[in-house]
Image: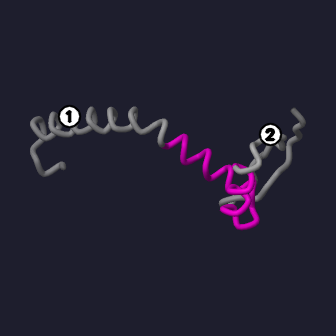
Amino acid sequence: MRHGVIQKYAHGRMSLRTRITVSLPADVLAHARAASGGDLSGYVEYVLRAQQLRDAAPALRAWRTRAGDDAEELADLFGAEIL
């Protein structure tokens, strides 16, 4: 795998990026290029970050459930007006 570190200004800050080379089936590459609007790297980053969120969803749902239980417990202790 070929790679190198580059810097890119994104979302108001400098971020380190690592250049990599990947191999994709032709049809997947064609779809990604068409969907990317000319920014294939940005598109791949968006897709990977979206997958990270999907992967984290079960843990987030569990946390929200626990946080909801905590909120009910706090309301019992301090009164419903804190919610």
The residue closer to the viewer here, 58 or 15, is: 58
Q: Which element carries disc 1, helix, strand or loop?
A: helix
Q: How many marks?
A: 2
Magenta span has 40? yes
Q: Nearer the viewer, mark 2 or mark 1?
A: 2
The circle on residue 51 is: none
Q: Residue at x 66, y 60 (%)?
A: 11
Please, which residue is most extreme toward the bottom here?
Answer: 37
Image location of residue 15, percent across then percent down = 74, 50
Q: Residue at x 11, y 35 (%)?
A: 77
Mark 2 sits on what residue? 23
Q: Is residue 6 above or below residue 69?
A: below
Q: Is residue 82 above or below residue 9?
A: above
Amino acid at the residue labelled 2: Ser
For label 2, count other residues whose C-alpha is less than 10 Å away and answer few (under 14), some (14-19) or many (20+): few
Q: Residue at x 76, y 66 (%)?
A: 38
